[in-house]
Amino acid sequence: QNEAVLLVKCPDKPGIVAVLSEFLHTFDANIIESSQYSTNPENGTFFIRLAYYCDQLADKAEQMEKNFAGIARAFDMHYEFHYRAQTKRAAIFVSKEPHCLLELLWEYQNGDLNMDIGVVISNYEDSRDMVEALGIPFYYIPANKDIREQVEAQQIALMEEFEIDVLILARYMQILTPNFVKHFENRIINIHHSFLPAFIGADPYARAFARGVKLIGATSHYVTNDLDEGPIIEQDVERVDHRSDVKELRKIGSKIERRVLAKAVKWHVENRILVEGNKTIVFH
Amino acid sequence: QNEAVLLVKCPDKPGIVAVLSEFLHTFDANIIESSQYSTNPENGTFFIRLAYYCDQLADKAEQMEKNFAGIARAFDMHYEFHYRAQTKRAAIFVSKEPHCLLELLWEYQNGDLNMDIGVVISNYEDSRDMVEALGIPFYYIPANKDIREQVEAQQIALMEEFEIDVLILARYMQILTPNFVKHFENRIINIHHSFLPAFIGADPYARAFARGVKLIGATSHYVTNDLDEGPIIEQDVERVDHRSDVKELRKIGSKIERRVLAKAVKWHVENRILVEGNKTIVFH
Amino acid sequence: QNEAVLLVKCPDKPGIVAVLSEFLHTFDANIIESSQYSTNPENGTFFIRLAYYCDQLADKAEQMEKNFAGIARAFDMHYEFHYRAQTKRAAIFVSKEPHCLLELLWEYQNGDLNMDIGVVISNYEDSRDMVEALGIPFYYIPANKDIREQVEAQQIALMEEFEIDVLILARYMQILTPNFVKHFENRIINIHHSFLPAFIGADPYARAFARGVKLIGATSHYVTNDLDEGPIIEQDVERVDHRSDVKELRKIGSKIERRVLAKAVKWHVENRILVEGNKTIVFH
Amino acid sequence: QNEAVLLVKCPDKPGIVAVLSEFLHTFDANIIESSQYSTNPENGTFFIRLAYYCDQLADKAEQMEKNFAGIARAFDMHYEFHYRAQTKRAAIFVSKEPHCLLELLWEYQNGDLNMDIGVVISNYEDSRDMVEALGIPFYYIPANKDIREQVEAQQIALMEEFEIDVLILARYMQILTPNFVKHFENRIINIHHSFLPAFIGADPYARAFARGVKLIGATSHYVTNDLDEGPIIEQDVERVDHRSDVKELRKIGSKIERRVLAKAVKWHVENRILVEGNKTIVFH
């Protein structure tokens, strides 16, 4: 519980690592993981993730953040401190198909996801039992495009009530409005059932079948206002052949979706992801 | 040399396999490999590939084909006999980048491709040495869109002179005219440097970089008149991450292209591929 | 429900396919899937799997089997008829770790496994709830090497009571006696948590860590009396690196185990596997 | 050419990164890549790879190394400076099968390997032409176990003459003596044609066939005096099935060997590998 992560993004120049590591050392913090990336050593953008351990971190955190503000100004840094003691709280949105929700519940039960699940919201009743069996609140909010605004108002109220940090669309088949997306910038994770940018939009498995592809895939990405165009976090594929009909593609695809979404969520809650424009830097 | 392959496509109904296997048995042919597929047992289309061994096949082939014509009529079959003794002759078209050509030459030298390479044609001189070193004729035919017709006339003349059965575009960066494509229907194999249908058209690696994908791919397909839309034979991918710039993507991609094209060519010359509409049935 | 599978193994010689397909045609059965393999066209062993559809199969099956007996004698065939209407009944054995059991229950609920689960037997109580929630009988039978014989007697009695066709060891950490194995020859499917033949025996993840391998794997195989030496049905691997400690290897490995065992079970209940000596022929 | 890599291994404690990055910053060196790993933040071993850019590095290097000696003493560091301007020189040893050698020559020509190939040594004449065509010296040194010592004396003399830094066994089928291995500790890279620790020793493809595995692999490792037991650098696998005979396994395997060895060599010459006991830490 004395662990934290510091994420930094700033213009690249010599000496950043020295300043950051000196800063941590001053507080007797030991760097346990460090990853960095620069788009270009000359005038590029520099990204770093520092995971550190620090005795009595709770007592020191405030002073550390205060001291760090000066460094950040000097180097024009965008930065975030994330404390392991403050477990992230997730909301999961799901429609009819439960496989992605189930995978997340499973990983959550196993202790593989460093997060709490605050609430599950669905426009179908189907998943209620499996969610409530784990003591997680389940809300049924019917949705369609005519009542979108009032639905989203209800959802936002629940996000606030449950103090949600990250919102996971685990095969939630409703479009979100720009207003909703703005509330949760870079904090809504979607799973799209194709290897983006192939088969953007509806019914990707049917279209994959029609095109005769030899691999199908799934893509997890942050949601932006451009449909299926947000920063990609993770993708994976499986081999298929002429014998696979649409139903079989869906079955194979559901296994890809499960593991791709679970990885993206895991990396998000471990603060391994930095967003830069329409891309992600993921520090594994 | 007493081996052959019979490819059949016809409306599905009971008894087809019985008739085909009885036919082969009549000639004392032993089925050594058999694969079949039906789009639907009820009113679907049936596809079969039968590889067989037959003593003194050369003497029997004519009579077999004659007898088979009657069966084919009765079942409304499209069919092809391919004899191992008649090695397929390939032409390879290449532009500046040699990696796919090199892979094919390598596999050819190893005896992994059951084909002869009749001729290599390029709009650059770069590959001449490595091709001629193997005793394969190399023709330099400069090409651009203003002289497309006369270039293709030269190319078609060479195809005829060298009795070419299959034409391999090993990163040949010129568009082919419908007239040219028609000459070689389902016999022109292309490698596209993306995971189709993502990044159709020019510069797929630059666009993959811009999109921030986490896997890049390559696709081998038969060439039709719709750019990058022909029946897909094989696809594969490799994992990349934020650190890979366009140059690195190209490097990683070139390895995928090499193996994807080599597989597609191998399956084609082993007569493992049937084309149905815009798809392939590949019997591995 | 009018579908069946015929599995045949016999000395290879010309005409087998003709006889088999003629046999099926006589009964108006339509072959919907056919796969074959020969160890050697000259004096080798021939294997074939024929999946067929036949109107009023229930009425015809007895006569078909009777007629087939003659063919089998003539060709010295080992053969099996499997009818889709007779769903296979599985028993699942599990110890403490539930992940493989959970995956099978999940696939079973989804309708992805063409089998009934007759009973789950465990030497721990942990899985009782999740099994009984699905209406499947759960038996807790404590086990250790001192009471092995009486434990197995109880287990065999349950196998008989529940008319079990296939026995799945979903991380069941007890050794089976030769007597028990003999009862269920080629019908006990185990999952071993390594890429066999690497790390035979106990604690493969700890040994994989000690050796510093860069990939870990799992292997599903039929159980014989030689520990971890039975015919391999399926294997798969995942990439790991120096950062993965034994706990992390176990976590990654558990995902491989889940999917490898699920595939092996699926192929077994779809009658896609033929055993030859210490190997399997799996017709995908 | 102003780039360098600093590799450090030492007991873990707080402040190491601060000291190292401050050291580099003092010389106006900009860290362009940094990776670290600790076996355990408490009393573990700490590993770091720092790639840096430094104007006029050639002029500063001597002073940097001098200053660093003090830091190293204080932290009990094992360390290495590697300068990009000092390209590593490799010797490649090969026997009859040329595929691994060919892959390395190919990557070398493409500029994908940051090394010079000083000499190729073989106990067969087969590869002479392809090597000499690239202007690389080729030495034919017949070898067998009776003349091992005199063969190795010749080889060591050549290593010295050509100032070799790294020795690549690209399917060199002779055992090396402890004396020879000692000369090149952690600098001899071998490719073994199996997924170690499965199939240690001779004829792994034949044994993989006999065992009926469903995946075959290859392993690249540093050579120690225990046969096939040295620190593993990289491994990979490909799927096979019952239809693959030993010859086919060899063909599939040769493609795995090519890419696994090429990766291991690339990482070695980029100074991405640290050896710890019988394991490698590879910083990708």
Image (cartoon, coloured by chain):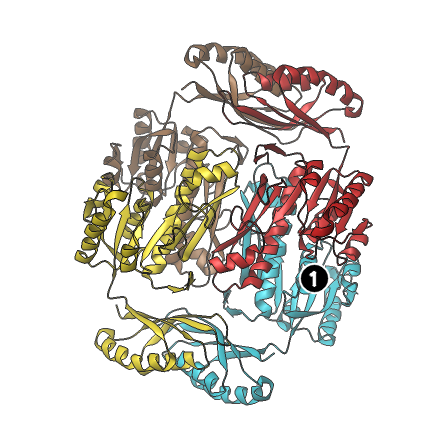
Chain colours: A red, B yellow, C cyan, D brown
Q: Nearer the viewer, residue C36 or A258?
A: A258
Vertical comparison of B224 with A110: above or below: below
| Residue A87 horizontal/vertical position (percent) | 76, 36
Identity of the residue drawn at 46% across and 33% down: B245
- Residue situated in front as seen by the camera: B87 or A148: A148
Q: Which residue is mark 1?
A: C105
Amino acid beneath label 1: Leu
Whether residue D114 is visible, yes or no, is yes
Chain letter, disc 1 residue: C
Q: Is residue A5 above or below residue C17?
A: above
Identify the residue at the far front of this view. A146
Q: Residue at x 46, y 50 (%)?
A: B197
Q: Position of residue C52 (x, y in %)?
A: 52, 78
User: Crowding at label 1, few (<14), some or many (≥20) Cα neighbours within 10 Å?
Assistant: many
Q: Residue drawn at (26%, 32%), measured in percent from left and top? A: D136
**Total marks placed:** 1
- Residue D146, given in percent of the width and then of the height, sits at 32, 41
Figure quadrant of the N terminus of chain C: bottom right
* SS state under label 1: helix
Instruction: Give residue C239's quadrant in the image.
Output: top right
**In this view, C111 is above or below C59:** above
| C50 over B253 or under it: above or below | below
Q: Position of residue A280 (x, y in %)?
A: 58, 35
Can residue C126 be seen in the rendering of this structure? Answer: no
